[in-house]
């Protein structure tokens, strides 16, 4: 490779070099894809295969692995904590789907409104949470939610409402996580809707305006139907993202109180990594994979994403 | 007429501004709290502005905890990762866009397939593998496994396809070897795409949490998110030092937010380019 880099651009080639020149042209694509191929095989393909195999073994990394068939899966399905984690994750998913997606859609419509000034500034403001470290922001929310000295309870009390035990009560803890998810992801999903809206022809709206349709009627009868593919696309990324939620409950509540906010990815971490139950953890990973892979495959089929033009 | 138009705009501005306020308020609270001492943070009802603007939380962060080291670790890891990702992604993207070769279709299929696989599937085997390679608690273990990401290669390939082949052939006629064509002709043309992928990669690495959490052991190796989390524990007999934590959160997030605002056009176009394509 170093020989190639030092080759000057314009160089008269003696005949003896012609063969080298042809050979390097032939080899080039293989050399160029080699780093990817090696890294992919070692750090992605092999671990993926290993995960499937490990799911059928009992192993703590020290003793020798023991084949136990489907007992990891049986154990997971018999574990109340897993079902708790699965139902919490489902709640996060539905909350994201029915709160984040509609909110992002409405927000995009507002920011797409021609009569709104400083649209770039508003867009940046709404997008800011996405670029921030989840850990940093979950810690900030931890302070805001604090029962005894948090800002939220101070506001509630100021308007005459009782304080809420945000992170200490099972139901409110879930609500707290959901508020954080909504706060963090609405602006991100909004970007997809904004891009979609900007590709809708202005003529449609002008025609509707002539027919006397107001903003809301235009939104319902033009924007939403034409954005259906984008809505579906965003919904699927929301579902896939929700299934992998980890940082927020990990930092904000550690999954508590009494597993009320535990997510499936956190369940995997606790059992697979912290308790060194590699087989069981891999089995959880395999289950997450099956769901995510199916959804992604549907998404690709529906949208032709990654099509090779 | 103009007056009624202005009046009608008021609700729109009100809703948009309220939403933006709610979005930015936690950041403002974070920055304000970072200047308060513990007595003030633990007072009720909370004060809005700190009674004095003290930098003691920031000073403590560097004096009592290795915050400077964490910062340096994060800059190093994110910087090296981004450089490596840009190089390997464009190199492979170039091959996929501009060459016909044996195994191309299979390899590209694998690449696309891998984007549908959640990280949780490989987390445990990767952890075992990396520990066998003695890369636990090292920069290498944080960087090497993610140096040639499928999405980066896909993104670069998309941009690459727009470069006319005649341009490459002209350079070859002049005697340029394939790598020279890539390095001197293709790379300069890719600058906008490199910017986009660079921002996404840097941010991803800077904020990355799960893998460093699994991998890092010693305090001196920690990156910022892991260090931030470490600030919340190991304080025997004391509650969380929220003032110091807010100072740390400010130093972790504010520089990134400023960079994002400066470069948001590229960042957003990058997010969209890997997605809705109809």
Image (spheres, coloured by chain):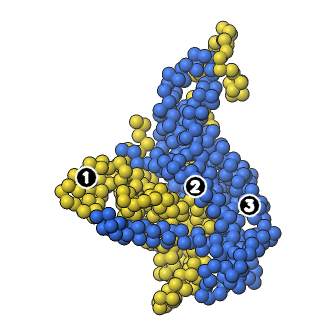
Chain colours: A yellow, B blue
* Residue placed under numbered mark 1 in the picture: A206
Few, some or many C-alpha atoms within 10 Å of disc 3 (few <14, some 14-19, many ≥20)? many
A63 to the left or right of A89:
right
The subunit carrying tag 3 is B
The residue at 55%/86% (across/down) is A154
Q: Viewer-nearest of labels 3 and 1?
A: 1
The reply to whether residue B156 is in sight is yes
The residue at 51%/62% (across/down) is A125
A244 to the left or right of A149:
left
* Residue placed under numbered mark 3 in the picture: B70
Q: Position of residue A254 (x, y in %)?
A: 59, 74
The residue at 54%/61% (across/down) is A128
The answer to which quarter of the image holds residue A309 is top left
Q: Where is residue B98 in the image (x, y as percent from the top left)?
A: 51, 29
Q: Where is residue A298 in the image (x, y as percent from the top left)?
A: 37, 51
Determine contact: label 3, label 2, CB under 8 Å: no
The subunit carrying tag 2 is B
Q: How far apart are marks 2 and 1 (CA)?
A: 35 Å
Q: How far apart are marks 3 and 2 (CA)?
A: 21 Å
The subunit carrying tag 1 is A
The residue lying furthest to the right in this view is: B63
The N terminus of chain A: image quadrant: top right
Same subunit, labels 3 and 1: the answer reads: no
The residue at 58%/44% (across/down) is B195
Which sits earlier in the primary sequence, circle 3 or circle 2?
3
The answer to which quarter of the image holds residue A110 is bottom left
Q: Position of residue A73 (x, y in %)?
A: 50, 64
Judge by depth and name the residue closer to the eye, A89 or B129.
A89
Q: Viewer-nearest of labels 3 and 2?
A: 2
* Residue placed under numbered mark 2 in the picture: B260
Same subunit, labels 2 and 1: the answer reads: no
């Amino acid at each position: 490779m170093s020989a190639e880099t030092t080759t000057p651009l314009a160089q008269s080639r003696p005949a003896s070099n012609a063969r080298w020149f042809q050979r390097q042209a032939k080899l080039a694509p293989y050399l160029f894809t080699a780093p990817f191929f090696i890294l992919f095989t070692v750090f992605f393909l092999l671990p993926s295969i290993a995960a499937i195999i490990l799911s059928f073994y009992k192993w703590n990394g020290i003793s020798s692995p023991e084949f136990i068939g489907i007992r990891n899966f049986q154990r997971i399905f018999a574990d109340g904590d897993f079902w708790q984690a699965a139902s919490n994750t489902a709640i996060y998913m539905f909350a994201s789907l029915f709160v984040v997606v509609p909110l992002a859609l409405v927000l995009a419509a507002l920011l797409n409104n021609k009569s709104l000034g400083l649209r770039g500034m508003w867009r940046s403001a709404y997008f800011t949470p996405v670029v921030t470290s989840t850990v940093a922001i979950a810690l900030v929310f931890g302070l805001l939610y604090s029962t005894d000295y948090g800002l939220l309870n101070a506001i509630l009390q100021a308007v005459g409402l009782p304080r809420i035990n945000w992170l200490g009560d099972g139901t409110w803890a879930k609500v707290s996580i959901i508020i954080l998810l909504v706060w963090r992801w609405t602006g991100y999903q909004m970007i997809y809707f904004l891009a979609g809206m900007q590709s809708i022809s202005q003529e449609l709206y002008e025609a509707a305006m002539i027919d006397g349709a107001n903003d809301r009627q235009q939104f319902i009868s033009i924007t939403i139907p034409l954005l259906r593919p984008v809505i579906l696309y965003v919904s699927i990324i929301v579902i896939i993202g929700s299934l992998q939620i980890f940082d927020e409950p990990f930092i904000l509540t550690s999954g508590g109180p009494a597993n009320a906010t535990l997510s499936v990815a956190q369940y995997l971490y606790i059992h697979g990594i912290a308790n060194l139950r590699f087989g069981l953890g891999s089995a959880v990973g395999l289950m997450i994979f099956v769901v995510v892979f199916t959804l992604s495959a549907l998404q690709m089929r529906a949208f032709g994403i990654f099509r090779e033009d | 007429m103009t007056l009624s138009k202005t009046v009608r705009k008021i609700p729109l501005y009100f809703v948009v501004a309220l939403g933006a306020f709610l979005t930015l308020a936690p950041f403002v609270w974070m920055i304000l709290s970072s200047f308060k001492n513990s007595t003030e943070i633990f007072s009720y009802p909370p004060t809005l502005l700190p009674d004095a603007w003290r930098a003691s939380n920031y000073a403590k962060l560097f004096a009592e905890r290795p915050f400077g080291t964490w910062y340096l670790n994060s800059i190093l890891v994110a910087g090296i990762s981004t450089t490596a990702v840009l190089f390997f992604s464009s190199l492979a993207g170039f091959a996929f866009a501009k060459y016909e070769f044996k195994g191309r279709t299979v390899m590209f299929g694998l690449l696309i397939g891998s984007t549908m696989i959640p990280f949780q599937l490989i987390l445990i085997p990767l952890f075992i593998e990396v520990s066998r390679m003695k890369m636990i608690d090292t920069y290498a273990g944080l960087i090497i496994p993610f140096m040639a990401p499928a999405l980066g290669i896909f993104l670069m390939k998309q941009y690459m396809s727009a470069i006319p082949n005649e341009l490459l052939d002209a350079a070859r006629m002049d005697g340029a070897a394939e790598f020279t064509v890539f390095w001197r002709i293709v790379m300069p043309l890719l600058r906008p795409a490199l910017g986009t992928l660079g921002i996404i990669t840097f941010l991803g690495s800077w904020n990355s949490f799960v893998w460093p959490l699994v991998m890092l052991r010693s305090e001196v190796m920690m990156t910022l998110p892991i260090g931030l989390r470490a600030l919340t524990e190991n304080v025997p007999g004391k509650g969380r030092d929220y003032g110091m934590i807010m100072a740390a959160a400010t130093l972790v997030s504010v520089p990134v937010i400023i960079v994002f605002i400066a470069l948001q056009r590229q960042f957003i176009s990058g997010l969209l380019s890997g997605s809705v394509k109809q």
